[in-house]
């Protein structure tokens, strides 16, 4: 099969299109013929080597974290899916590799594709959908009437999280640029802040949860200050915490590293009587099935900026790296 691989880590490195062995299907796996693959900033960070301390993938390996496609083979113990099923998934760590014609995935990480979505639309959902779900439902336990601040509302996670937060009954504030105000308004945002001309700290107060995705340390500090007593900041960009290290089973010395690098922000959060949580989303087929229900009910709609061909995978990654995409970028493979 054809696949785009990371030959060696580096910001200037391109992914290489190459012939690759078809994946092995273990007893609990389904083999999926990939129709489309969402492109995420995580794909760039993995290629750059930014995560190799925590996720030590050994080059050469196939990149890509989002997939929609058709089941072509099932393992001997698979009970949830059959050949011919249209599915989507964010494969679990160490099983990634959706920039390819086929991928083998544990059935627990897979869900049936929403019937009302195309393959390209479905391929855009898993990673951002699960990120928003784990931040707002699992960690945040958002209730009706609570206030949520979602940074970068027109991005991949933002466009999904706004819709989910509104469905949960929250009042939603978000940041975006002037040209995307109408987009985030159409998704349900109640209060929209133009990050280029306005300071969100002067507009927001007593928020229950901040979904934080900006690497600027000043933005992180401001975000903590707008939370109410006992409020939570869920960060997608770090710093990673010892709790995260424990969850993914890192050795003691890496737990120590995460403790040291998150000490400062945890102290600041404690001083303000708030909570800092680092979220590195995980694969979860059951949660994806819940997301399917919301999509099929018309509650959440995918937002897609551009669809690239398989051969244009590197261009798709470069486009995502600009940080200017409205919603998601997808690669059409079949």
Image (cartoon, rainbow, N blue to C red):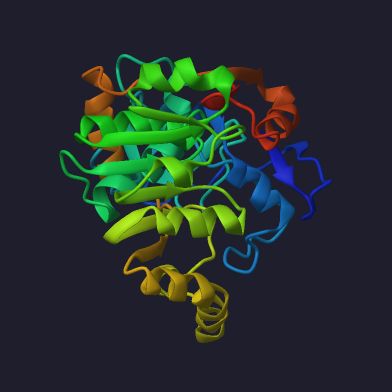
User: Position of 320 compared to 256: left or right?
Assistant: right
Q: Image point 43% across, 28% down: which residue?
A: 192
The x, y position of residue 75, in whole percent, is 36, 45
Quadrant of the image occupied by residue 272:
bottom left
**Residue 195: horizontal and vertical position, in percent?**
56, 35
Residue 69 x %, y %:
45, 26
Which residue lies most toward the front here? 202
Relative height, residue 52 to residue 161 (above, below)? below
297, 163: nearer the viewer: 163
User: Image check: 166 left or right of 67?
Assistant: left
Q: Dividing the picture into quarters, in which one does residue 5 lie?
A: top right
Q: As displayed, is residue 48 above or below residue 295?
A: below
Kindly give the residue lying farthest to the right in the view shown. Answer: 12
284 or 273, nearer to the observer? 273
Quadrant of residue 51 in the image?
bottom right
Instruction: Look at the image and tell me in which quarter the N terminus lies.
Output: top right
Residue at left 32%, top 69%?
273
Report the front residue among 294 and 87.
Answer: 294
Residue displayed at 51% across by 51% down: 95
**Image quadrant occupied by the C terminus:** top right
In the picture provided, is 310 more to the left or to the right than 257?
right
- Residue 208 in sight: yes
Q: Position of residue 295 (x, y in %)?
A: 28, 23
Seen at 38% across and 42% down, the residue is 149
- From the viewer's side, name the closer residue of 142 and 267: 267
Q: Is residue 81 visible?
A: no
Q: How many numbered badges does the structure rendering display?
A: 0
């Amino acid at each position: 099969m054809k696949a785009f691989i990371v030959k060696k880590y580096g910001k200037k490195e391109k992914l290489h299109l190459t012939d690759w062995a078809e994946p092995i299907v273990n007893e609990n796996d389904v083999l999926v013929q990939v129709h489309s693959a969402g492109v995420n900033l995580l794909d760039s960070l993995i290629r750059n080597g930014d995560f190799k301390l925590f996720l030590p993938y050994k080059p050469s390996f196939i990149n890509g974290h989002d997939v929609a496609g058709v089941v072509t083979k099932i393992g001997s113990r698979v009970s949830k899916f059959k050949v011919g099923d249209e599915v989507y998934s964010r494969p679990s760590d160490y099983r990634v590799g959706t920039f390819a014609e086929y991928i083998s995935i544990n059935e627990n990480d897979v869900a049936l594709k929403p019937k009302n979505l195309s393959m390209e639309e479905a391929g855009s959902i898993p990673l951002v959908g699960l990120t928003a779900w784990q931040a707002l439902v699992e960690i945040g336990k958002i209730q009706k009437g609570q206030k949520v601040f979602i940074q970068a509302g027109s991005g991949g996670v933002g466009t999904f999280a706004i819709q989910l937060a509104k469905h949960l009954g929250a009042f939603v504030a978000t940041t975006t640029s002037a040209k995307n105000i109408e987009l985030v308004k159409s998704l349900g945002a109640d209060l929209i802040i133009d990050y280029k001309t306005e300071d969100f700290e002067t507009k927001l107060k007593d928020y229950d949860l901040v979904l934080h995705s900006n690497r600027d340390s000043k933005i992180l500090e401001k975000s903590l200050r707008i939370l109410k007593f006992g409020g939570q900041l869920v960060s997608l960009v770090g710093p990673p915490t010892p709790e995260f290290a424990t969850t993914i089973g890192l050795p003691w010395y890496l737990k120590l590293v995460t403790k040291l690098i998150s000490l400062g922000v945890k102290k600041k959060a404690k001083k303000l009587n708030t909570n800092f949580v680092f979220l590195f989303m995980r694969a979860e087929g059951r949660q994806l099935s819940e997301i399917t229900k919301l999509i099929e009910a018309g509650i959440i709609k995918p937002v897609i900026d551009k669809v690239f061909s398989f051969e244009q995978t590197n261009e798709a990654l470069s486009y995502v790296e600009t940080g200017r995409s409205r919603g998601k970028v997808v690669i059409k493979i079949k």
